[in-house]
Image: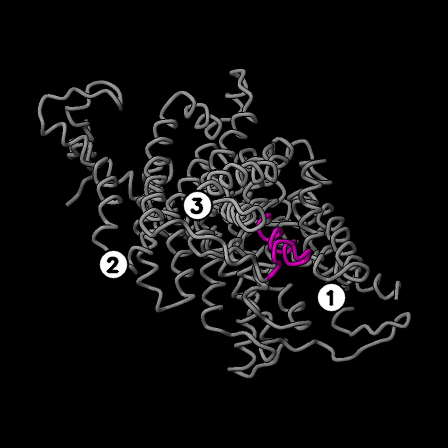
Amino acid sequence: MFLGTMIYALINSAILALMAIGFNLTFGISGVANFAYGAVYILAAYASWLLLNLTGISFWLAAPIAILLSMAFGAGMYRFVLLRVRGQALSEVIATFGIGLAVLELFNYLGLVGFEYTLPVLIDESFMIADTMVDMQRILIVLMAGLLVAGLWAFTHYTRLGLAFRGIAQDERTALTLGMDSDRIAMLAVSFGCGLAAFAACIVIPLGSISPSEGYEVLIKALAVCIIGGLGSTGGVILASFLIGFAERLTDAYISSHWTMIVSLAAILIVLVIKPSGFFGRQKELEERI
Amino acid sequence: MSRLNQRRERIDRGIKARAGDVFALCSWREMLYLLAPRLIPVVGFLGLPLVLDDYWQRVLLSVAVFALLAISWDILSQSGMISLGQSLFFGLGAYCSGILNHYFGWHPLIALPAAALLGGLVSTLFLLPVLRLRGVYFSMVTLIIPLMLVRIVEATKIFGGTEGLSGIAPLPSKWVEMYLIVAVLLGVLFGFRRMLNSDYGLVLKGIKDNDRSVINAGINIYWFKTQALFIASSIGALAGAFMTHVYMFVGMPVFALDYSILPIAAAVVGGPGTLAGATLGAVILVPLSEILRGIGGLRIVFYGIFLAVFIVGLPEGLFHYVERKYHQFERWVEVE
């Protein structure tokens, strides 16, 4: 029982990390808080569902197309909306929130909700680990989350584009003088963030079903993880997802599932009171936040 | 026609003697010119209940409620705090009034102002820890808190839990209801507009524009932010408390997304920065959403699109645009 809870807590943490990392990437590099993040997650899920069921192509083809579509959506959103309000953090929030709201409520209106709206699992098998049933999809999620974090780390440390990302994140003006186009990089950052949201959707959604209310949930979870970990810090995201992931499962197992959401939300408030810059908030972030 | 060598020159009308609020009036016509924009909302809100039928009176009621919420949002945003969770204030006010009436049997007319102050106080206490956060971070937390409260009510089953509290006493009569909220709206609109134009309001605007220089001036910005938060949340709480007595019910729907989104949409469409803009936005959007009731959930889609389009296309909002056209001549002049 206890070991089983621990295994599921680990899986839950991996899911949280997957959900939050895109939001974190976008914010860390371009400073855009993408409140349409949850909407992109759902958009990608519906896009791959439609591709699967209308055109009948395989999931291995549909998922990459959905991810590319989401990246295009993100790039378009930056190019046509965010670029015009760039630098005004609050206008960015309102604009992305408005877009996200429109997308989610549109799907709500279309009423594409139900058990048939789900994506297929990659490999349909289950294992017994320490007397607990764990299906292959959940193990894959943990593996993918690990690979993704490692891949992102390598990308931002060893490729030209990744280094440019970090350059813009550290000091936009200095980066500009060295010939990095901050608008282009920011567009890519928003686009990559949306792509990561879509990626998360493609492998997490098979566990449940697609519904627009999930979009708000994802946004809240991503916000929670990023606020606790310190926005823009990848290490913080991983630590915070473990923290919330375990806290959620433990309350689920030992108190009541009603309290699951409250735990993560209360964690945010407590962290903000004690250490407003989050666990990994550095000096600069502190300055931005307070 | 090419305007390459020309620029648009804007000239204030001659009536404006020196500053924005010093006028030299020479005739009744000029007096009327100044009075008309102020009389329109007063006469409109006081006169409309007399000519509207029951259904549209209800709509006017929600116009006033959403205008109050939008004004509350605007006061916060003028102090540099962008709230994405107006439903926190609305919901806490609603619950306070419901509890005072349901458990303690207070008369609605006493419970209403008490709930406004109490709700304002509780919301301020909730947001006090995050007051030090700037910009986006503050917005994120305000988005989260109402959701958390819904879950808490659901989990602990306090105050009626998912069922809510019903059978709350209504206000004495339909007309008291109508004119009470209209009077409150007009009072809040003109009163706080005046306050924000005073030195006190200048400090709040200063916090929004550059908080560090306000700190440098030896002003405790957190104390001022707390005050602005209390004012704004009391206004929101009053709106919520009022709706509790209109519906004679309070429950989890008071924390719904509608009460967060519509006020922001109204303030953005109408024009942030002047409380009149927020009111104008509510006057436009609420009846519009009534007309669009047939399309159901698609309404929120439109609010979302409105928000994005206005914040990008007309960030000053309708009110500033109209105000400029009203107060200034415009002409094209050659660029030397």
Classify residue A269 as left or right of residue B19.
Answer: right
Instruction: Give B317 or A256, whichever is nearer the viewer.
Output: A256
In space, the residues marked 3 and 1 are separated at their CA atoms by 46 Å
What's the amino acid at mark 3? Ala
Give the residues in magenta.
B145-162
Crowding at dot 3, Cα within 10 Å, few <14 / some 14-19 / many 20+, comes out as many
Which numbered disc covers residue B98?
none
Q: Is circle 2 on the same chain as circle 1?
A: no
Find residue B110 and report its horizontal and vertical position in percent.
Answer: 47, 40
Quadrant holding the C terminus of chain B: top left
Label disc, if present, on residue B53 of the rendered structure: 2
Q: Is residue A184 visible?
A: no
Percent x, y of residue B268: 38, 45
* Residue B295 image-quadrant placement: bottom left
Q: Is residue A212 visible?
A: yes
**Label 3, on which residue?**
B239
Q: Main secondary structure of the magenta part?
A: helix
Q: Check contact, mark 2 vs mark 3: CB within 8 A.
A: no
Q: Chain ID for label 3?
A: B
Identify the image quadrant of residue A215: bottom right
Residue in the picture at 20% in, 31% down: B10
Cα distance, mark 2 to mark 3? 22 Å
Task: Give the image location of residue A237, x and y in percent.
Answer: 71, 49
Q: Which mark is residue A141?
A: 1
- Image side of residue B254 versus residue B23, left or right: right
User: Left or right: where does residue A166 sit relative to residue B302?
Assistant: right
Residue that appears at 73% across and 62% down: A257
Q: Secondary structure at mark 2?
A: loop
User: In front of the other: label 2 or label 3?
Assistant: 2
Structural distance between the alpha carbons of marks 2 and 1: 59 Å
Tell me the crowding category of disc 1: few under 14, some 14 to 19, or many 20 or more residues within 10 angstroms, Cα based.
Answer: some
